Amino acid sequence: MPQPYDLITMGRIGVDLYPLQTGVPLAQVQTFGKYLGGSASNVAVAAARLGRRTAVVTRTGRDAFGDYLHQALREFGVDDRWVTAVPGLPTPVTFCEIFPPDDFPLYFYRQPKAPDLELRAGELDMDAIGRARVLWTTGTGLCAEPSREATLAALEYRAKSGTTVLDLDWRPMFWAGPTGSAAEQARPVYAKALAHATVAVGNLEECEIATGEREPHAAAAALLACGVELAVVKQGPAGVLAARRDGTVAEVAPVRVDVVNGLGAGDAFGGAMVHGLIAGWELERVMRFANAAGAIVAARLACSSAMPYPAEVDALLDGHAPGAEARPEPRGEAPPEARSEPRGEARPEPRPGPRPGPDGGSGPAAEPGAAR
């Protein structure tokens, strides 16, 4: 029998086309960089960079961009065996604008429908999903059928075994109807998912959508009441609050960095959090390490290719400024559990004000665990 995966993620994938000029609107950008994108895919990349065996369950178009995403996943060390093509639907593309330190509007092109929303429960490898040490699911996966049914089926199959994460991942433009009705539609769906998850991760807005609570401690308590064992509430510049059902609480302050692009910070946070939970670290250490990983990516331009290696996270926790790009670990490093002593402070969570995208949705929050 094959070894179980450390992490299997389910959800969004696409091509990020990010400006190579900052501080200018999209209409004036001259050149772009092409990167693998999508929150679930980036989380798998982030954990792989930290030495974990990862795979992603998602779908692309049957096109050149889909071919590129398979190539990129393999280069990052993420298993792409469950990334399949949907004939007739194009691979999604996402543009952004970069206005440091805290304004990074996203422009999603996922019409007529994103292939990753065509995940079907009957096509999932439930044996692999059930055996993985961590399953990571997202709110976007709940926004439309048949992905909603597939996501709930995977969560139910896990039956709270191992670590089962729901990233609240609230993107109102992906849900049917105007934002107000979308929020009303989303809450009962989130409740179904949370009942089968052991970990919930979200920013204050996402927690409010899922539970009706926005005050951090009340939001954490509400998530725990929904059935999870660990609630992680991101508070922007105030840091991160993590609370376990057993009463353990960790409140971690930000680590200050010069933000270049906050969009990948949340995915780095997620992958690093998974890494720490698998390693069995105490809660505050997990949160500090995850915040530092997010800070490193916020100080870089890209998302997936900016994900840090363990030595880079350690260096930031030791007080060294993050480098411009990720570099491979030297061969012969200690195993992941042996790395990264808890040191220093954790990273900032800059949160931009709303800025409309092409579909009328607001712009993103550039904070660990929420950036996409």
Image (tube, rainbow, N blue to C red):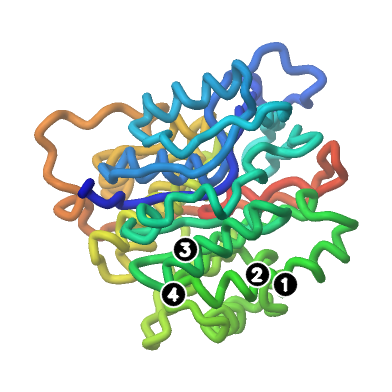
Q: Is residue 167 visible?
A: yes
Return the residue found at the far front: 122
Q: Residue furthest right?
A: 178
Q: Residue at x 85, y 36 (%)?
A: 358
Which residue type carries mark 2? Tyr
Pinpoint residue 36: horizontal percent, then vertical percent: 53, 29
If you read the primary sequence from the N terminus, does the residue marked by circle 1 or circle 4 appear first? 1
Inter-mark Cα distance, 1 to 2: 5 Å
- Answer with left or right where residue 161 lies relative to residue 253: left
Name the residue beneath numbered marker 1.
187
The relative height of residue 157 versus residue 300 in the rendered view (above or below) is below
Q: Residue at x 57, y 58 (%)?
A: 151
Cα distance in 3D space between marks 2 and 3? 12 Å
Q: Residues within 10 Å of mark 2 (few under 14, many from 20)?
A: many
Q: Secondary structure at mark 3?
A: strand
Residue receiving disc 2: 190
- Tell me, yes or no, whether the two marked residues, 3 and 1, touch with CB atoms within 8 Å: no
**Residue at x-position 59% and y-position 43%:** 12
Of badges 4 and 2, nearer the viewer stands 2
Which mark lies nearer to you, 1 or 4? 1
Distance from disc 4 to disc 2, alpha carbons, whole Å, reads: 16 Å
State which tag comes first along the sequence, 3 or 1: 3
User: Which picture quadrant has residue 33?
Assistant: top right
Quarter that holds the C terminus = top right
Q: Which residue is mark 3?
A: 165
Q: Residues within 10 Å of mark 4 (few under 14, many from 20)?
A: many
- SS label for mark 4: strand
- Which element is circle 2 on? helix
Q: Residues within 10 Å of mark 3 (few under 14, many from 20)?
A: many
Q: Earlier in the sequence, mark 4 or mark 3?
A: 3
For the residues labelled 2 and 3, say whether their Cβ atoms are less than 8 Å apart.
no
